[in-house]
Every structure is written in structure tokens, then in C-alpha cells.
Amino acid sequence: MPEFLSLVPPDIARDTLLKHIEYSPGISQIPVFEALDRVLAMDIVSNENLPAFVRSTVDGYAVRCVDTFGSTETMPSFFSIIGEVRMGEKTDLTLSEGQCAVIHTGGMLPQGADAVVMIEHTQKSIANEIEVFRAIGKGENILHQGEDVEIGERIFSKGNVIQIGDIGGLLALGFVSIPVFNLPKVGIISTGDELVEPGDTLLPGKIRDINSYTLSNLIRKYGGIPKTYGIVRDNPDSLSLMMRQAHMENDLVIVTAGSSASVRDYTSDVVNLLGSPGVLVHGVNVRPGKPTILGYCDHKPVIGLPGNPVSALVIAMLFVLPVLRKLRGEVRVEPFVDQRVRVSINISSVTGREDWVPVKFLSPGRDGILVVEPIFYKSNLIFSVIRADGFVKIGSDANGIMPNDILDFYRI
Amino acid sequence: MPEFLSLVPPDIARDTLLKHIEYSPGISQIPVFEALDRVLAMDIVSNENLPAFVRSTVDGYAVRCVDTFGSTETMPSFFSIIGEVRMGEKTDLTLSEGQCAVIHTGGMLPQGADAVVMIEHTQKSIANEIEVFRAIGKGENILHQGEDVEIGERIFSKGNVIQIGDIGGLLALGFVSIPVFNLPKVGIISTGDELVEPGDTLLPGKIRDINSYTLSNLIRKYGGIPKTYGIVRDNPDSLSLMMRQAHMENDLVIVTAGSSASVRDYTSDVVNLLGSPGVLVHGVNVRPGKPTILGYCDHKPVIGLPGNPVSALVIAMLFVLPVLRKLRGEVRVEPFVDQRVRVSINISSVTGREDWVPVKFLSPGRDGILVVEPIFYKSNLIFSVIRADGFVKIGSDANGIMPNDILDFYRI
């Protein structure tokens, strides 16, 4: 049983694979209201000003600000009301000196008006006349044309992931459909003589395949289209056949190796058969997840994950999601730190190896930093990490972590 | 135009509405692999041990640990190999004194074995014999039956939101379908004479309706089924008719009021017509979002949001999502703090009112706490907050925030 000849640091391993990927699964034009979490395939430039017209931001009276100068509680200025601006209509009112018009929040300013007095700062003295108790400046309580966005402004860039607010911004400017990158298809294969489908009878010595389903859900959650290929028995030819099919039908193939050493050995040979350059990395200097395989075969990435469900999740976070993000057209593909956290107790680690340790939240300390407690687990104990809120990374330069040390925290 | 008679603090306003909700939209049995983010409707108790059998966690040799006692590099103990445990099968091997069996990670321990020696700590001396260079303890490198989960253990509770790891845990124990609460249906109405559909021609004085679409996406993202009812003109009868239909067809109704004062005035009357007790809160002491209406009508919650898209988003976060979570059967329904952050510059605020201020991330400070910069915006400028990473809450007891003050940060 061969040892890994040389273990590659995780960051270098990831970069090695990412820099091969030039492939994109194409572009589609889709309705904006269905575009949440999709990735823009082109820059978007506004064809309009937003707001398109000068609007009031309050309920009150549109005025010429110069007519309010010098007004106070005791020395109000007087305005005659020449009409009301109706919501959603262009008004044909025009203000002359000493005139005002009733206006509502969002209403279009009449000709001549350059500010709005809030209703709270006025009083109706007689019919069609108000007193104004305060001087206001030019532009007060109004939004100018184009104050939010100007014609020709680039509002979103290629690679942006569409958020809920973005949908509002696009629709506000009349974009009802946008070009987005297609979702990458991801083929998922599990291997191992010990595996059975979760619904099947569990004979002695067998365990249920869970990786296919956790990985499918992870892929779907992060914006890919998963396709599971079921369980392949410990046999290079069966694996080769199935991987060839998955490679043809998808943009990325992930295979979770059976936990037996023999399977781990031939998986890399099978990856090499899928096309050149083949296996780029076999063995990563990380715990858990050492036996990871990263390959690029005939223009498509292929990733071999450890069969242990905890390792599979960590390696998915470290390698599968970054590759998925790159295929999706995202700009920021590396795993990203959620926040810095303080560790409650010491954690042992070995210099030279990166460790990812599941942790659960305790509560924020007095300085505001969240305190987390590491969850110690044996390999393969899925339930011991189910309740984890995420992982902390212990860098390869660390030789153990002391209580109160601050580490980067990553959500699952 | 009536002022709000009394503004209710946001937390009290929310509690007032939440405590009325006793309604649940029912329960369905669904496949576990489709249950991500769904809410469990019953406790789940394991019918099995996990692992179901004693398993090796390494590649090596199953032994009786007592036979390794005293072994060292210079004084190894010798074992004869009586066979190999095949993956996924119950082995019929039984170890006697001085015997061992080849075993792979995940393999089932043979009778008599109580530990596994890692292959790295052995050497094959002659065919069918190994030297062991280290003494190992009972249970070393094995998982006991039920070590992860024992028969009868409650593994998940009613109200748990199913995460990716949970799917693995459930499937590992043979649960292929689970009872979950149905997704609440949410009716969404926009009102205002100034509104047009995003795809329609924009005449002077009009703006495009974006709230229906941002709110739909928010509801879908957080686990509801949104249904939009389009734009209702500023007319109490039309609004009443549409709200009655939405109330009949959904578990929650939200209406974004047109920004004009007249619409704000009659919306609460229309809510009262939908059933008792009707409007519970009209006017919340929060900025933005003061004109919010919270009602409970004939056993269903009804929420009136300000038309300003920024306010609508904040109020959705403060009131709509908690109500949605309660209807979904979640246990934790209040808005939850993502982390504590440090503010880069001062922010003015008024004692007695709660402020929600959009902020964007700068970078973590030297102490590990993320620094954020407030985004100052005028009412209705959607683009000025699109790039916000979330909001900080300034409590009603604060009278302005100083640079370096630490606040609670909430993601959108």
C-alpha cells in the first residue's frame, strides 16, 4: 500500500487545479426575478436616470426655497396653495413667488419648486393658505434626477452574484431579464463494497451511502446541478466506466472513494484514464482529507474525496466549492472567512499540516469576539460534527492552539 | 393627516404579533434528500446503533491488544495472519493468541479482536507473519457499536431546521423520509398610483414596483411560498378586495403601502376589515420603517410595510421573517445577530428610537473584530444600500455612536 509521495499544502493544491479551469458552461438570458444567486455574465449599464424625475421624500408642500428665507416660529412666511400634485402623474402646476403645491412622498415636483417643506413645519391658516415656520435650503427633502443612478453608469459587473437588493435595483431601472452563466452540472459517484443505498436493508458489515446525498445538497445549495450516479463496487473497471459517463455528462465530477486502501490506490489511475493532464495533486497536507485527489481531464475538473463523511465535507469546502464557484463564473472563489473567533480550550496540531476543526458557538466574549468550542471527533463519527456551526482553520505554521487564541472561522 | 398616536418599540411590536400566531400550515412526509432547510415536525429517535458493528478506523491488522503488550521497535511482537476482513462483509474469522487479520478502514472487526494496529507500526517479516513495534490499548483505532448514536437516542427535535450534515445523519440511520412542516404561503400586494410593473413603459411621475419582487425572493429564500398579487391602485375598495383574496389564499399577507400619506391612512382600516383582532400595532419606533402595520386577522398575520424599498427590506427582516419562521415551525424566530462589529465612524441617532443602519465590511481590526462603515442614504435610494453587507442595530438607549463602538451586525 503506497504512501503519498509528497503532500501538497491545501492552498497550492487548490491553485494548481483552479488555474487549469478555463471552461464555462455557457450563458442564458433569464428573468430578473428568478435570478437570485445567479452570476452575471456581462456588465450591466443603466439606460436611465434613477429617479427619472425630481421626487419629494416627505409629505408636505413643494415651494421655492427662496420664499422661505427668514421664516421662524414667530415670523412665519405665507404661501398660497395653487393645487395638489397627484401621485404617479406629471403635474402641470408651475410655482410663482409665494406659491406652493401639496405634495406626497414620492410625488413629482412642479415647475419652479426646488424644495419641499415637511407638513410638520407648516400650519394651514385659512383655506388655500399655509404658514411656514422654518427656512429650508435648496434641494431639501427632494431626490434629484439621477441621484441614485445616472444614465451610462455601470451598475453591476460580470461575475457579480445577484442578491435580493440587486433584483430590486435591476427592476427599478427596467431590466426585466439579464444574461447569467448557466449552472454547472456536477456528477457524483460513491465507491465502496461496504456501501448500500440508505433505503436498502443493512446487512452486517455494510454502511449506508450518505456522501452522495450530502454532496448533492451542498452542490445545489451553492448553485450547481447535482446528478448522482449511485454506488460503484470496488473494481477499477466499473469505476472507470461510471466515471467516463459522469465526465461526459457533467462539468465537474466528484468521486468519494471507498475507505479501503485498495480503492484509494486505483482511483487516481482511473482519473488519469479520463484525459490529460489527469491527476494534478494526490495527497494534501490537511487533516481531515489527506487522500484527496485533484485532477483535470480533457478540460474538466475531477475531484476524489475521502469516503469518511466528515473529511468529505471539509474537502468539499476546500476544493469542490471553489471549483464550482469558478465554473459558475464567480469572481471570488476561495473559501471565505466568516469571522474571527476565539477558541475556548487548547487544540493540538502539528507544524507543517493544516487542520480544520469543527467547532460550535458559545457566546460572544466581553470584547465582542465570538467564543467557540472545538468538537473532538473520531474519524467517521458523523453525528459528532452535525451540531458544529462550522470549522476553524489551524494554519500549518501553528504548533497547537492555546485557549483564547483567535482563529479564522468558516461556515459550512 | 393623522400622526401615529403611539410608536411601539420594535421588540414589543414583534412579540405582540408573534404571540397571537398559533397556526401551522400542516405536516408532510418528504424524502430526506429533499429536506434541506425544512423544519422537522416531530422528534426523531434512532432505531439503530451507529455504527451498527465494531469498525476499524485505519488500515492495518486487527489484534487482541493484550498480545501487543511490551512491544517496542527493538523488541517487536510477532503475529500470524489468519486472513483478511473483506469490506462490507461479516467476517467469520476468530482470533486466538498471537493471531491477527488484515483489515481496512471501515472493516468489521473479527471475533476476539479488540484493537487495530496501524500498518505503519508493523512490518511483514515472512509470508503470513508480521512484527508489531508498539503496544496498543484496548479499543485503539476502532469505533464501538453505537459510539456515534445509540438505539433509542433522540437525534433531532421537532423544530430543527435540517442542515446538510443532518441529511447525512438521518440517512446513515436509515431514515429516508421525515415529517416536516409545510411551507407557509405568503401573499404579497403592492399599492400605489405611482407604480407600474417593471416591464411596462415608464410614464413621467411613475416608478417601477420592485417590492413585490424583492419580497418574493426574500420569502422564497427563507422558506416560504410567495404569491404576488400585482399592483393595487390607491383606493380602499380595490385594496380591500385584493387583501381579502390574498388572506383567503395564504398563511401570511404582506402589503407594501404606497408612499403617499392617504394610502398609509386607510391601509390599517382595510386590515381591520379582514377579521379580528385586526391591527395590533400601527407605527413602530424604528428608523427606517415607522409606518409599519402589524395585524392578526381571523387567525392569520397581516403585515403592512412602508413602500420605500429600503424600509421594506428592514421591516421584512424585523417582522416578516420572524413571522415566517414561526409559521414554518422554527424554534428560533427572532432576527439573529451574525456577529459583533466595530463601526469606523460616528453615526448620529436619537435616544428612544431604534435605528437600523446599512453598513459595508472594511477589514478585521487587529483584535479580530470586523470593522464596518455605515452607508448614509436618502430615503428611497435603493442603490445606495444594494452594496451593503447588512445592517447594524443602534439601540433606543443610544444617543449617537462613536468611532470604534461595537454593535450587533445582522446579515440581510
Image: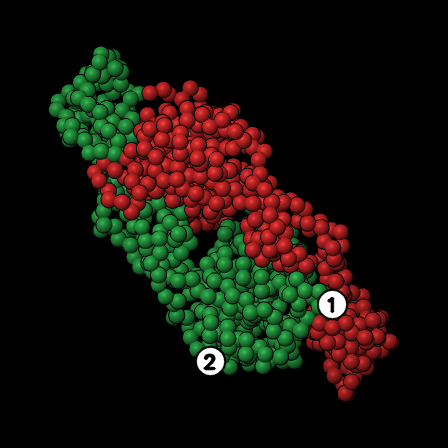
Chain colours: A red, B green
Q: Which mark is residue B275?
A: 2
- Seen from the viewer's position, the closer of residues B68 and B272 is B272
Quarter of the image for residue B300 reads bottom left
Q: Do marks 1 and 2 both belong to one polypeptide chain?
A: yes
Q: Quadrant of the C terminus of chain A?
A: top left
Query: From the viewer's perspective, is the residue at label 1 or at label 2 nearer?
Result: 1
Q: Badge 2, how many Cα within 10 Å: few under 14, some, many 20+?
A: some
Indicate the position of residue A185 as horizontal and vertical percent values.
Answer: 49, 42
Query: Measuring 59% from the left and 67% from the top, which residue is drawn there?
Result: B289
According to the image, label 1 marks what residue? Answer: B203
Q: Which chain does the residue under circle 2 lie in?
A: B
- Seen from the viewer's position, the closer of residues B339 and B411 is B411
Q: Which chain does the residue under circle 1 lie in?
A: B
| For the residues bearing labels 1 and 2, Cβ distance under 8 angstroms | no
Q: Is residue A128 above or below residue A18?
A: below
Query: Measuring 70% from the left and 76% from the top, which residue is drawn there?
Result: A120
Q: Is residue B62 above or below residue A164?
A: above
Secondary structure at numbered mark 1: loop
Q: Badge 1, how many Cα within 10 Å: few under 14, some, many 20+?
A: few
Indicate the position of residue B144 as horizontal and vertical percent values.
Answer: 23, 37
Residue kind at label 1, given as amino acid type: Leu
First in sequence: mark 1 vs mark 2: 1
Q: Quadrant of the N terminus of chain A?
A: top left
Residue kind at label 2, given as amino acid type: Gly
Q: Is residue B328 above or below residue B5?
A: above
Q: Is residue B255 visible?
A: yes
Indicate the position of residue B365 as horizontal and vertical percent values.
Answer: 57, 42
